[in-house]
Amino acid sequence: MALIQTANLKKTYQLGHVQVPVLRGVNLSVQPGEFVAILGASGSGKSTLLHLLGGLDAPDADDFKLLFDNRPINGMNAAQLDQYRRTDVGFVFQFYHLLPELNVLQNVTIAAMTRWGWAFSSRRAEVEKRATELLRSFGLGDRLRHRPVELSGGERQRVAIARALINGPRLILADEPTGNLDRKTGAGIIDILLERRKAEGRTMIVVTHDPELAAKADRVVRIVSGVIE
Amino acid sequence: MYQLLLTRVYLTSKIMPLLASVGLGLCTALVLVVWSVMGGFLTTLLSSGRVFAGDATINWPAGIPHYEALIKKLEADPAIGAVAPIIDTFGVVKLPDDRIEGVRIVGIEGKSYSRVVDFDKALWWRPIKEALPKDRDRKDPRLNPDEQDWQAIYENSISLTKPDRVTGERVPAAVVGIELSGMTQRDGAGYYTPVGLAKPRPDGSVQNLDLYLHNHQIVLNIIPQDSQGRLMTPTSKPLPVAGEFRTGIFEIDRRTVFVQLAELQRLMLMDAVAGVKSSPSGAFNPYENVAPDGTSLGNVETTGATPARVSTLVLRAEEGFTPDDVRQSAMRVYTEFAEEFRGSVPQAFQINNPRGVKTWAMQMSTLVNAVEKETALVLSLFWFITIVCSALILAIFWAMISEKTKDIGILRAIGASRAGIAGMWISYGAILGVVGVALGLGLAYIVVLNINSIHDWLGYSLGLYVWDPRVYYFSKIPDRVNPANALIVAGAGIGFAVLGSIIPAMRAAFIRPVTALRFE
Ligand SMILES: Nc1ncnc2c1ncn2[C@@H]1O[C@H](COP(=O)(O)OP(=O)(O)OP(=O)(O)O)[C@@H](O)[C@H]1O
Ligand SMILES: [Mg+2]
């Protein structure tokens, strides 16, 4: 049984009077625990697809299927969608997207705060311990109180990964996690992601231009002119 | 939870919203200071104006006969502490420099009047030892015992009499509002000094007048009415002046003359007179043969006395009763009284209405309304400024949210709800409100409690007297903060801060995560 299942998924942007079809009917199934790499030219709609899978955007209203664990993501109401984003999915963005005013530790624990709401107070110690362990295992043990601006790109990306992992989601959606990094740093980040995946049996969908990363995937799919080849 | 964290972080890292909060604080301080001072001004004004108003009055200008009986009944009522009969009428007065002024003439009976109002406190000319607070050079003439015999003037004023210049016998005298004669002038420090008036002699030369009104006499011109309100022969009466009073309310101090009740009753023809029937012979002098109690002394047949009348009874409340209680009691008692003296006194329905029986507040309602309107006007102006402050918060939040669009998108992407995001900005606004208001209240309290020293300092060092006692009639600026007002201002300040944050918060809540994430 697939964890993610899409059929005939379409997304068209409206630019003035011009319709720009980006996804023209994506059919994709991802099994639990699978690691799928998505390749495609720039502008081919890879980020768009991840946003749809992560419930951040809605696909065209057409006859389509978009299921997570057999539940239609498009059928969720606002509260369920928030719940889905905070517990089931961990997003790693292409450009880190950390909150500049928060330090490293806070940038990680804030995801747990959105998950637990006011009940977070009673879990604070536990969450902070887990966040510290994660960051330590990423080699950031001595940078907990630093602001994102004080970190290098690779370090920031590792913080973003720790944030995606803190709530123990079943699905990781990573958008070019190594895109801005040199090869060596990129490789280090791939190792971190993969190590976690094996240890915890997590499903991963990773968008990448990086052949080294793609080579480690269970399966590689390509988006060409809006469909998966 | 993340709301708390981010609000805390933004509070310590963002300077603009804090500046807006300080602005809001200044606005609330301004509102509270103005409200306290103006409100205090109103209170002071009322308590000064109240000096002669008692707590309530019963009023029938044509005269209430048998008023001694009514007073006895009224004083038996538990709500009513004391009652004074007075005549409250109008007349024209000729002043020592031959100026003519229309005035309110009030006839009082020293003893009973003092039981109802603080007549004694209002008397201005008296010996004093302590100079007024701003009179640093001790220029107040009352400080100098050699200037005039202040003690004698004070005692004359209380009794409304004065020793006759020739015989030394005490004769009725008037006590006049201090602003009426124009012979003295109020200084910035709050005391009065003589101006020095003159008047022309018939031969064209100029005569300098004695500096003080109490060394002169005035002439009262009065038009009496009978009990049905018909005009009778006008009378003119020269009266020596015993002294002057000051309530602090210009209109009262400029247009009031006190005289003895008995004297005014005589002048107004409201005193007791015997009625007579003409004898068959026709010729008689009614005043020669009738004793004051109305009994006949000779060949004239009397028909009983017409009782003395007063126009007004001034009532003081017993401890623990409000002016409204007194008014209610007065109307109840009057009904009984009218029943008892049916036919010879005004009927209950004539008296028991808002014109006949008034509390002091009703009596002063024009003045009160004027000051209240003015306060409301000024306050609404300042509230407007506070609303502008709220708009300032709106603008700053709007800009901040534009800048933070991406962060909001990130929060939404990791599962923050719309309500959560909106709540964050609103609570941020509320906290800014609380910070600003706390600052503002603190500042307002400091300013109001020390307003007199601040004002003195301003005057002392910069020569800047905003509150000139010549204009404002009180030498001290009101310096109390009403806690209820402070609470309202605080609530409104926070409310406006929240109001200012609501629209930006809504905007933040409706930012679409994808758009926000693509935002650079
Ligand atoms: N809000 C939008 N309005 C209009 N067009 C958009 C919008 N968002 C994305 N697009 C267009 O959709 C196409 C796909 O964008 P997307 O970001 O998914 O590409 P991508 O495959 O992730 O590219 P890259 O490898 O450069 O990140 C692009 O041509 C982009 O211009
Ligand atoms: Mg992309």
Image (cartoon, rainbow, N blue to C red):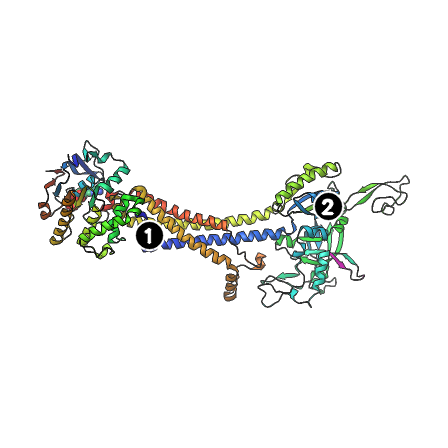
- For label 1, the residue is B8
Residue B477 vs residue B202: left or right? left
* Disc 2 element: strand
Q: Residue at x 80, y 62 (%)?
A: B166
Ligand 1 within 8 Å, label 2 CB: no
Percent position of residue B184, x then y: 65, 61
Q: Does B358 sit above or below residue A154? A: above
Q: What stretch is highlighted in magenta?
A: B160-168
Q: In the rendered picture of this protein, how many numbered marks are placed on residues?
A: 2
Give a yes or no on whether discs 2 and 1 share a subunit.
Answer: yes
Residue underneath mark 2: B310
Mark 2 chain: B
Q: Whole-percent x and y of residue A148?
A: 23, 54
In the rendered view, tell whether residue B132 sits above or below residue B516: below
Q: Tell me if residue B247 can be seen.
A: yes
Mark linked to residue A21: none
